[in-house]
Image (cartoon, rainbow, N blue to C red):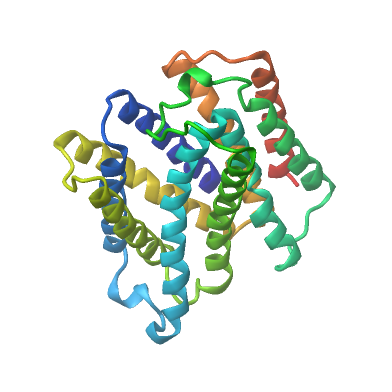
Amino acid sequence: MEFIAISAFCSVLIAHLLKMVIRSELRLSHVLMVNYFVATIAAAAQVSPQHGFVSPFAAYDMWAVAIVTGFIFIGTFYLYGYCVDANGVGLSLAAMRMSLAIPVFISVYFFNEQLNIKGIIGFILVFIALMLMIPKSQNKEKKQFVKFKFDRISAYQSGLFLFLLFMLTGLGDSSLKLFERYYTEIAREEMFMAIVFLGAFFMSIAISWNMGKLWPNIYEILFGVLIGIPNLYSSIFVLRALSELNASKVFALVNVSIVVLGALTGWLIWKDKMQKRQVIGLGVGIAASFLLAYA
C-alpha cells in the first residue's frame, strides 16, 4: 500500500507544480520537454549494466511497447488540453478518471484477476466518488491549461475528443500492466520507464520545434527538473504496486487517492473552494479506499 501512497503523492505534487507553471505563464511544452529529459536520465542512471536487460534480444517488443507508451503519455497530456478547451474541465477530468475501467477490464478479462465482494463494492464506490469530485462548472479556468481555441466545434468532434482522451489514458495505464505481466523478467522498471520517457522526450522536441522556439529558459528548466523526478516515481511505484496487488485495486486506489489528496491539498495550499458534492465525494472515496485496501 505504501507504493500506492507514494505514487499518488508524486502525482499530486506534479499537479501543484504544473499549476505554478501555468500561473507563471511559462511555456508548458518546454517545461514538459525538460521534464521528460530529466526523467529519462534519472531512470537510466539507476540501471546497472548487469540488471538493465536480462536478455537484450528478447527485449525488442518491449522497446516498441515502451516507446508507444511514451507517445501515449505526452499525447494524452495535449489531448487533455484540447478537451478542456472544447468540453470544459469537468467532462475532461471525468473522461480521464473513468478510464481506469480499461486497465481493470484487461486485468480481469485477459489476466483472470479476481475481485471479491468488498473489491467490487469498493470499485463501484470509486466511480461514484470520482463523479462527485468533478466540479459542476469551471468555465473561468477553461482556457487556463493550454492555449487552444475552438471557435466552432461540432458535438461529434467534442465527443470524439472525450472518447480519445478516455481511450489514451486507459491504454497508458494498461501498458504498465503489460510490462508487469510480460517484461519484468527481461528488464527492470527503471529501464522500461527510461525508454518510455525517452519516447515522450523526442515527441516533446518535435512539438517544441513546431512551436517555433526549441530552447527553454532558466525557469522552464527549473520547473522541468522539479517535475521530472516525481513524474518518474509516480510510474515506478505503480509498477511496484502492480507486482504485489491486482491491477483493479491498484488503479482504483491510485485514482481515488490522487483525487482526494489533490482536493485536500488544493484547499490547504491554493484555498480552492469545494462544493458540497465534492465533500461528499471525499467521504465516499475514503470509504472506497478502505474497502479496496482490505478486499
Identity of the residue drawn at 78% across and 54% down: 115
Please state if 16 lies on the left or on the right of 24 as rendered: right
Q: In which quadrant of the rendered view does residue 105 lie? A: bottom right
Q: Looking at the picture, tell me which residue is in the foreground, 37 or 48.
A: 37
Indicate the position of residue 199 as horizontal and vertical percent values: 35, 62
Please state if 169 lies on the left or on the right of 16 as rendered: right
Q: Compared with residue 90, is residue 2 higher up or lower down, i.e. above or below?
A: below
Identity of the residue drawn at 34% across and 28% down: 22
Identity of the residue drawn at 32% across and 61% down: 198
Indicate the position of residue 156 as horizontal and vertical percent values: 64, 43
Q: Looking at the picture, tell me which residue is in the foreground, 211 or 14.
A: 211
Indicate the position of residue 255 as horizontal and vertical percent values: 59, 41
Q: Compared with residue 160, is residue 107 higher up or lower down, i.e. above or below?
A: below
What residue occupies the far front of the structure in this picture? 152
What residue occupies the far bottom of the structure in this picture? 57
Identity of the residue drawn at 26% across and 48% down: 208
Q: Compared with residue 76, is residue 65 higher up or lower down, i.e. above or below?
A: below
Q: Looking at the picture, tell me which residue is in the foreground, 11 or 131.
A: 131
Indicate the position of residue 277 as horizontal and vertical percent values: 69, 18
Q: Compared with residue 163, is residue 270 higher up or lower down, i.e. above or below?
A: above
**Total marks in image:** 0
Please state if 67 lies on the left or on the right of 242 as rendered: left
What residue occupies the far right of the structure in this picture? 117
